[in-house]
């Protein structure tokens, strides 16, 4: 029985992600991806014409998810509760299934992503997500806090080096740090120092 086209595409993406993370994007060839899948290069080309197309598929998946989060946040009041819920929803999405591998890939291949249009789209969408987090307080400090709260979720995959930490513990720590960053957004400024 033939595997569905969607299933094949997902297998290709999973193997490519594994190789891109192990060896780096630039050091991985389509031939290696085909070999690991035990298919011909022609069969691989049927689904993806280039490594860039594979990366674009990762990014498109994330863009869709981020767009949903932004739409949800914009329909909510600009409160600390909304900010906390938004960052928790983002963390849930980023910690789900293969998403940690995608996050590691993005972190390890930043130079490549900057040169791809998909990477530029991702950067733009992350800025919109940060805007949803600081909505109601466009001060420079709020903008930075919002961006850093997103980075807290991302960096938990490479900055927390505790061996054998569970994904749940990693998520809890990331959200704790993000909450500390988000709490002052929208609050009256304290006295100048």
Image: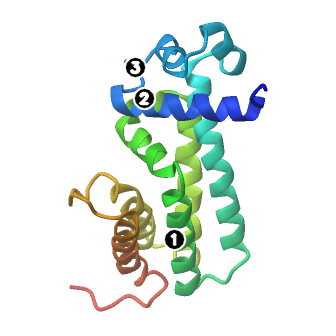
Residue 20, label in figure: 2
Where is residue 163 drawn, in percent x and y? 21, 58
Where is residue 170 drawn, in percent x and y? 35, 66
> Where does label 1 land, which residue?
87
Residue shown at 61% from the left, 82% from the top: 78
Q: Is residue 1 above or below residue 141?
A: above
Where is residue 34 drawn, in percent x and y? 54, 16
> Where does label 3 land, which residue?
26
Residue shown at 35% from the left, 71% from the top: 169
**Left or right of 40: which side holds 23?**
left
**SS for callout 2:** helix
Disc nearer the start of the sequence (1/2): 2
Separation (CA) of disc 3 from disc 2: 8 Å
**SS for callout 3:** loop
Marks 3 and 1 in Cβ contact (< 8 Å): no
Disc nearer the start of the sequence (3/2): 2
């Amino acid at each position: 029985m033939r595997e569905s086209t969607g299933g094949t595409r997902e297998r290709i993406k999973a193997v490519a992600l594994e190789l891109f993370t192990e060896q780096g994007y630039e050091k991985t060839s389509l031939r290696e991806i085909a070999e690991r899948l035990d298919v011909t290069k022609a069969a691989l080309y049927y689904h993806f014409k280039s490594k860039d197309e594979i990366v674009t598929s990762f990014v498109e998946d994330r863009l869709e998810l981020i767009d949903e989060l932004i739409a949800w946040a914009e329909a909510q009041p600009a409160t600390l509760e909304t900010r906390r819920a938004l960052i928790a929803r983002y963390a849930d999405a980023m910690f789900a299934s293969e998403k940690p591998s995608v996050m590691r890939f993005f972190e390890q291949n930043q130079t490549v992503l900057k040169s791809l249009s998909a990477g530029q789209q991702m950067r733009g969408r992350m800025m919109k997500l940060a805007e949803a987090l600081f909505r109601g307080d466009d001060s420079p400090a709020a903008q930075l806090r919002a961006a850093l709260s997103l980075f807290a979720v991302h960096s938990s995959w490479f900055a927390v080096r505790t061996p054998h930490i569970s994904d749940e513990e990693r998520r809890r720590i990331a959200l704790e740090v993000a909450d500390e960053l988000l709490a002052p957004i929208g609050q009256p400024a304290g006295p100048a120092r």
